[in-house]
Image (spheres, helix red, strand yellow):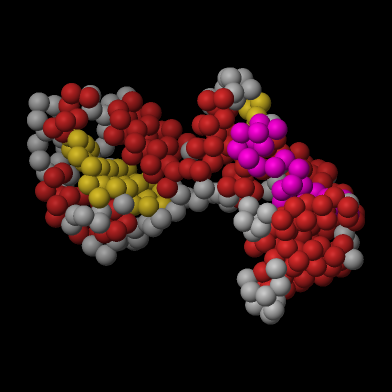
Amino acid sequence: MDDVKQIVSDIKKGQLKPIYFLMGEEPYYIDAISDFIQDNVLSEEEKGFNQMVLYGRDVAIDDIVSNAKRFPMMAERQVVIVKEAQDLSRTIEKLVSYAKNPQPTTVLVVNYKYKKIDKRKTLYKAVKKSGVVFESKKLYDNQVPDWIRRVLAGQNYSISPKAAQMLVEFLGTDLSKINNELNKLKIILPEGTQITPDHIEENIGISKDYNNFELRKAIGERNTKKAFKIVTYFADNPKDNPMVVTVSLLFNFFSQLLHLHGLHDKNPRSIASALKINPYFVNEYITASRNFPMKKVSSVVAILREFDVKGKGVNSNAVPQGDLLKELLVKILA
């Protein structure tokens, strides 16, 4: 995120590079930088003759180079944006000759999503020397809530830890999807608002009471009644609550409990740091570790591995996933 801010800041100052090679697994920041260049480098009057958007599936490297070598018309520079450039992965190295001697009046933006070029090869070194290479890395699950908090803080909003966790559990690590949902909330809610689980439930449709976050908490507390109530809801709404997601999240939870049992320093701050969790949730993990000794946690991890396979249709004899979840819960809480 700091790299993105620096790139945007330099562009705002007029410190433009002739090439921006945007690559990596997370498309959100690639789109953000590319869109900023597309919207802000040229005036509206200049864009008509001097801004071009190409698509990797429709062009060859020679076409890109030919367009990049053109001179701008009645403007200081032109902008050439290549979207979906990953479709040119087999020939992308052919861009090296241009990267070594780029047109100084052209800003070439290459959106190379979900992949990255080999940093040992000549193209990477050439672009790095003449322009900007930005790698957009995928965030881990535990990093996304903090990303949500920082994005909202920059726009004069805040969010409760539980609300952020609900978004991650429902939308995963897809930053574009999460950002779209946050934008919807910002339309509805005034600046300065703290986004709560109620806001998420009312405006996005994620239940604040029947979700994997609450199931994990109920299991950790050995609250059998609440856990079975949530699992029954999941069984009645299988499309919104796929078993594979529930099993994966529970597996991560119990794996973290194993880690917690192995810690020498049980100070809450040390636990939060070691498990890479928000300090808000530390007590939940401490409670679960008391209710599930290490030996039991180890057996639960093995059970979850077994049901992960069953949930994917192996050795399950076509048992409905709702019934598998109930059976899983019985074994965890036994």
Q: With respect to residue 223, does 334 lie above or below? A: below
Quadrant that contains the C terminus: bottom right
Left or right relative to 244: residue 182: left
The residue drawn where x is 67% and y is 75% is 318
**In terms of depth relative to the viewer, which is nearer, 175 or 184?**
184
Is 215 colored magenta in this rendering? yes
Total marks in image = 0
Residue sitting at x 34%, y 33%: 36
Rendering quarter of residue 109: top left
- Pinpoint residue 53: horizontal percent, then vertical percent: 23, 42
Say which of 241 and 164 sits in front.
Answer: 241
Q: Is residue 298 left or right of residue 202?
A: right
Residue 154 placement (x, y as % from top left): 53, 26
In the rendered image, the residue lying farthest to the front is: 236
Q: Nearer the viewer, residue 304 or 282?
A: 304
Q: Is residue 202 above or below residue 261?
A: above
Q: Position of residue 21 (x, y in %)?
A: 31, 47
Residue 176: image x %, image y %? 48, 43
Which residue is found at the position 30% from the left and 34% from the top? 37
Q: Which residues are magenta?
A: 198-222
Q: Nearer the viewer, residue 319 or 261?
A: 319
Regarding residue 265, the answer to whether it shows in the image is no
Q: Is residue 117 above or below residue 278?
A: below
Task: Evaluate whether residue 242 shows in this view.
Answer: yes
Q: Quadrant of residue 134?
A: top left
- Residue under the point 45% across and 49% down: 26
Chief secondary structure of the magenta portion: helix
Question: Residue 167 is drawn in which quadrant?
Answer: top right
In the visual, does 204 lie left or right of 86?
right
Residue 44 painted magenta: no
